[in-house]
Amino acid sequence: MRDSRRARLILGLLLTAALVLLTVDHRTGDVLGPLRGAGTWLFGTAERAGTAVARPVAGFFDAVVSAPSAKEQIDRLQAENARLRTELAAGRLDKARSAELKRLLGLAGLGGYKVVTANVVARRGHPGFEDAIEIDAGTGDGIRPEMTVINGDGLVGRVVEAAASTSTVVLLSDPASAAGARLEGGNEIGVVHGVGENGRLVRFRLLDSTAPITPGHRIVSFGSQRGAPYVPGVPIGVIERVEATPGELTRIAYARPYADMTALDVVGVVVQAPKHDPRDAVLPKNGEAR
């Protein structure tokens, strides 16, 4: 009972003090303003400090929550970039192959050669030969061994083996390769042999040692009986240097092939020889590159 009276007395005193303070503050202006300002500064500083501490923590948790979606977006963008690069490369490749095919068909048309086009799918050796390629056309396309192979620039080689859907072609640059050849503008003939060196040069042995031959002369295929393994008139290359061979019955020169043996892609297998020897008609015009 005594405690209840004491509690009511204390509560009454607190209420009276509160009313007095409110009355004084109202009548005298902002007497308690400094106290309120101090309280505001004190608690505001505490709030700002708490916010500064909490902000990195909140940012960390936001980053953790959004990290999977960000990684997915990065992966998606990288995949899209890779796809675009692939499409761009494919477009360039298709454009280059289209240009090669156009040159090949143009050369075949000039020479009267009926060809089956094919792509080079591998470069590999073959028993007895060092420099050979594999193409994606074979007997199912009418190809058989001992057929001439050309590209849009000139003579490439000959077929030595044919399967149903692939064939092996020995390049003109192979040291064991040999093809009859003729000097442009005349009847001087000789034999072209590969010398390796990545196909940069071929050796031309001119059978008539008295026949004039100088750098810049061009040579074409002489042709074989029934056009196998070589049809006539296919551009072979340009003479770069002539060796001195005094007292010998033949002359030796080295020619740069028109066909780049290190960068073969689209080729044509001549499945039907021309009715007439095109002679020099397939050679590029002077000043033009084949």
Image (cartoon, rainbow, N blue to C red):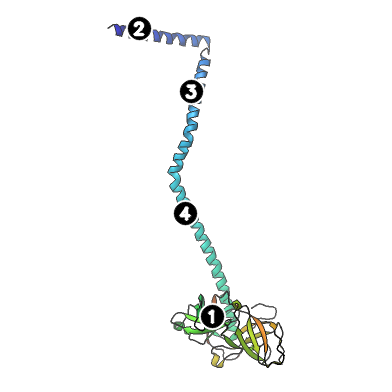
Residue at (49, 9) in percent of width and height: 24
Q: Is 247 drawn above or below residue 108 in the view shown?
A: below
Q: Which residue is mark 1?
A: 130
| Residue 280 visible in the current orientation | no
Left or right for 201, reference 74: right
SS at circle 3 = helix
Q: Earlier in the sequence, mark 2 or mark 1?
A: 2
Q: Earlier in the sequence, mark 4 or mark 1?
A: 4
Q: Which residue is mark 3?
A: 43
Foreground tag (3 vs 4): 3
Q: Outermost residue toward the left?
A: 1
Q: Earlier in the sequence, mark 2 or mark 3?
A: 2
- The three-letter amino acid code for the residue at tag 2 is Leu
Q: Earlier in the sequence, mark 1 or mark 3?
A: 3
Q: Position of residue 121 (x, y in %)?
A: 50, 75
Q: Which residue is mark 4?
A: 76
Viewer-proximal residue, 241 or 273? 241
Q: Position of residue 88 (x, y in %)?
A: 54, 63
Residue at (56, 67) in percent of width and height: 92
- Residue 215 falls in which quadrant of the image? bottom right
Viewer-proximal residue, 147 or 107? 147
Q: Position of residue 48 (x, y in %)?
A: 50, 28
